[in-house]
């Protein structure tokens, strides 16, 4: 893949906040997130696995104008690597540990990079 500029942290964080709000609202249909904490996390994992694995973005990423692509070929990362990335993202620590290219440990493990969408 050609060299790409990783998306700024602010856009990535905005996308995560939007996705988290969607997950909280969705999980509230079957469990109270204030009492049972795991349902929104499970929804986040599913949303990220399917959205990023198959389409390269979640709803929050679409609104924040960022995409997650395979570092080697620029395509979608696939469901298996999407699941790995989603589980590591749900653990939060890998996401906040970034390298000089603004790739978190979850991106490095999945072989992905989050980039700004062209205007």
Image (cartoon, rainbow, N blue to C red):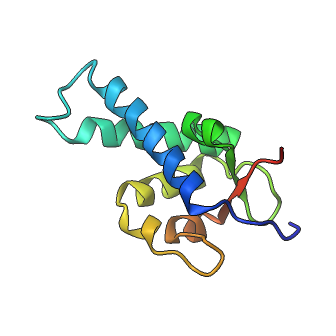
Give coordinates of residue 108: x percent, y percent: 59, 71
What is the residue that sits farthest to the bottom in this orientation?
Answer: 100
Give coordinates of residue 23: x percent, y percent: 38, 33
Quadrant where the image shows the C terminus? top right
90, above or below 33, in the image: below
Q: Quadrant of residue 56?
A: top right
Q: On the rendered structure, is 33 left or right of 100? A: left
83, above or below 104, in the image: above
Quadrant where the image shows the N terminus? bottom right
Q: On the rendered structure, is 36 left or right of 1? A: left
Q: Nearer the viewer, residue 8 or 43?
A: 8
**Residue located at (53% from left, 69% from top):** 104
What is the residue that sits farthest to the top in this orientation?
Answer: 29
**Residue located at (47% from left, 38% from top):** 18
Q: How many marks?
A: 0
**Residue located at (49% from left, 53% from top):** 13
Q: Quadrant of residue 28?
A: top left
Give coordinates of residue 115: x percent, y percent: 71, 57
97, above or below 14, in the image: below
**Residue located at (58% from left, 38% from top):** 58
What is the residue that sits farthest to the left in this orientation?
Answer: 35
């Amino acid at each position: 893949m050609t060299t790409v500029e990783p998306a700024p942290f602010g856009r990535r964080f905005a996308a995560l906040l939007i996705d988290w709000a969607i997950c909280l609202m969705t999980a509230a249909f079957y469990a109270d997130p204030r009492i049972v904490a795991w349902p929104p996390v499970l929804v986040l994992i599913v949303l990220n696995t399917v959205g990023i694995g198959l389409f390269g973005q979640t709803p929050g990423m679409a609104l924040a104008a960022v995409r997650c692509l395979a570092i080697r070929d620029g395509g979608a990362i696939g469901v298996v690597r999407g699941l790995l990335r989603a589980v590591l993202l749900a653990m939060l620590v890998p996401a906040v540990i970034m390298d000089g290219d603004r790739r978190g440990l979850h991106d490095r493990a999945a072989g992905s990079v989050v980039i700004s969408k062209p205007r």
